[in-house]
């Protein structure tokens, strides 16, 4: 899928504020077996030389489980940035590691203003996140589809929290990334949600064409 002559995934990932801090080999792509898979893999390897690719044979029980498939390739104590690449924006934290140096910070989730129930939402009190919900408007702070965890340990603990509380953390029986924020909070970590401007949800871009 192209956007102004550029593949959608490049339009999203290549324009992130923190992109110039990442090496091509830092990227791990989780993809599913689909027609023309070889073409996709070839493009990813050309665009991000040295990237790692995890291929799933079927649908999983949600984005949480899909991302878990990539965790075996993440170094311990290395920050984890999960980018769903379905919302375009260029602002946001250009140096996530500096934000993680904030005492107690366990996760960072960029947000934008919205009231549509097609997004996930984070409720904030005194500048920090206190709750997250999937496709439930609990505030005006919609997730921009990027989730940063200080390290793999915090991510895995949050994943376990969602799995253990699947009845309340799932949406239509599926586990997503945004509700994992509740697990980060439950473990005593702070979650920051910097506001970003000029978001372009991919679905709306193509719907308006």
Image (cartoon, rainbow, N blue to C red):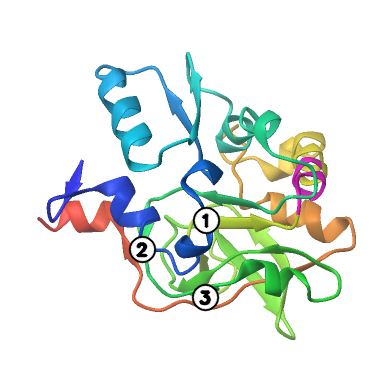
User: Which of the two discs, 1 and 3, sits closer to the camera?
Assistant: 1
Corner quadrant of residue 193? bottom right
Viewport quadrant of the C terminus: bottom left
Identify the residue shown where x is 42% and y is 64%: 16
Evaluate if marks 1 and 2 touch, with contact meaning CB atoms under 8 Å apart.
Answer: no
Residue most extreme to the right? 188
Identify the residue shown where x is 70% and y is 49%: 180
Q: Which residues are magenta?
A: 151-156
CA gap between label 1 and label 2 equals: 12 Å
Could you tell which of marks 2 and 3 lies nearer the N-terminus? Answer: 2
Name the residue that disc number 2 marks. Answer: 15
Name the residue that disc number 1 marks. Answer: 22
Corner quadrant of residue 37? top left
Can you give x and y, in whole percent of width and height, for residue 178 in the image?
61, 52
Name the residue that disc number 3 marks. Answer: 140
Residue most extreme to the top? 57
Helix, strand or loop status at disc 2: loop
Residue most extreme to the left? 209
Count of all numbered marks drawn on residues in the image: 3
Could you tell which of marks 1 and 2 lies nearer the N-terminus? Answer: 2
């Amino acid at each position: 899928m192209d956007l102004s002559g550029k593949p959608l995934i490049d339009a999203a990932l290549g324009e992130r504020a923190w992109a110039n801090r990442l090496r091509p080999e830092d990227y791990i792509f989780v993809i599913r077996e689909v027609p023309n898979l070889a073409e996709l893999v070839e493009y990813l390897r050309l665009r991000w030389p040295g990237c790692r690719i995890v291929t799933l044979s079927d649908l999983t029980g949600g984005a949480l489980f899909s991302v878990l498939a990539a965790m075996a390739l993440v170094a311990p104590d290395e920050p984890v940035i999960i980018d769903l690449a379905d919302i375009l924006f260029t602002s946001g934290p250009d140096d996530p590691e500096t934000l993680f140096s904030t005492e107690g910070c366990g996760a960072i989730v960029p947000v934008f203003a919205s009231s549509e129930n097609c997004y996930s939402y984070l409720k904030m009190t005194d500048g920090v996140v206190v709750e997250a919900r999937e496709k439930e408007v609990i505030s005006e702070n919609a997730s921009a589809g990027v989730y940063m965890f200080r390290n793999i340990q915090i991510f895995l603990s949050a994943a376990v929290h969602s799995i253990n509380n699947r009845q309340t953390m799932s949406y239509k029986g599926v586990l997503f990334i945004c509700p994992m924020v509740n697990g980060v909070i439950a473990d005593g970590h702070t979650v920051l949600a910097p506001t970003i401007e000029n978001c372009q949800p991919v679905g709306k871009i193509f719907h308006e064409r």
